Image (spheres, rainbow, N blue to C red):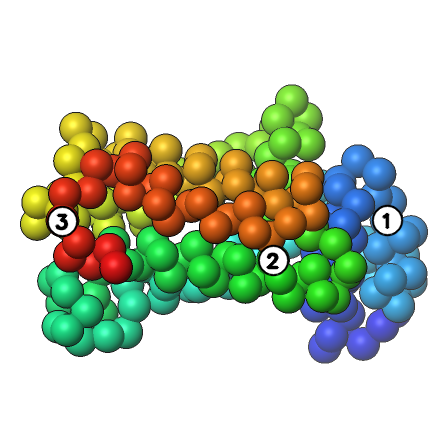
Amino acid sequence: MGRTSDARERILTAAKTLLLSRGYSALGVAEICKAAGVPKGSFYYFFASKEELALAVIDEHWTEQRAAWTRALAGGGGADEGGVVDGDGGVRTLRGLRRLYESTAAELREGQRSCGTVTGCLLGNLALEMSTGTAAVRERLREIFDEQVVLVEEVVAEAGGRGEVTVADAHEAARALVALLEGQVLFAKLYDDVGRLDVLWPNSLALLGARTSAGTE
């Protein structure tokens, strides 16, 4: 068995890379172990099945991504950013959406440099592949996308409260924005072109019916 101090992390890292490039169904435990440099015994010491591993990868990925989304949406500026300063000193404005789109594009470009192609979103890829597959994975992905909607909804609701946007339902508007983001990431993967995300910002403003330039420049 590999060193217990790092074997699990090596398995998770290898599985994440392979899931992103190969998907779930075509991936076997033996391939994951080979990429991680551990024997099968190490795999089954930490994970009862490939499904359990996939859930662990998803949770670890979302923990990191959620922190990144929170930073992008809240920002770290002061009152000159426009909007309302929250209790933690962050600022949520529509510019947070723009930061989210920019950070997503940057992540895709970094992946493209490493892999030679746009690999897309791990969560989105798995959602497409497993929409009629493993129930536990599907349910976890649903929960995560619902969390993404809530994060974006806070920004939309604040902008609505300041009269910057005109939406009837902040939650449904946020759901549409998350779907827009995931859709453009899918197109970026399909066309191997991160530039497909360039339309996200203007299309989001149109979707929200942005009334003023406050926080949108």
Residue 13 lies left or right of residue 72; in this view the side is: right
Which residue is rendered at x = 60% and y = 39% of the image? 187
- Badge 1 or badge 2: first in the primary sequence: 1
Indicate the amino acid at tag 1: Val
Where is mark 1, residue-wise? 29
Farthest residue toward the top? 132
Between the residue at mark 3 and the residue at mark 1, the CA separation in whole angstroms equals 53 Å
Q: Please state which of residues 40 and 208 is positioned toward the viewer in this rendering.
A: 208
Task: For the N terminus, give its image quadrant.
Answer: bottom right
Mark count: 3
Foreground disc of the pair 3, 2: 3
Which residue is rendered at x = 70% and y = 56% of the image? 16
Q: Which structural element holds mark 1?
A: helix
Residue 212 tag number: 3
Q: As displayed, is residue 35 above or below residue 174?
A: below
- x, y (%) of residue 164? 13, 47
- Res 81 → quadrant: bottom left
Between the residue at mark 3 and the residue at mark 2, the CA separation in whole angstroms equals 31 Å
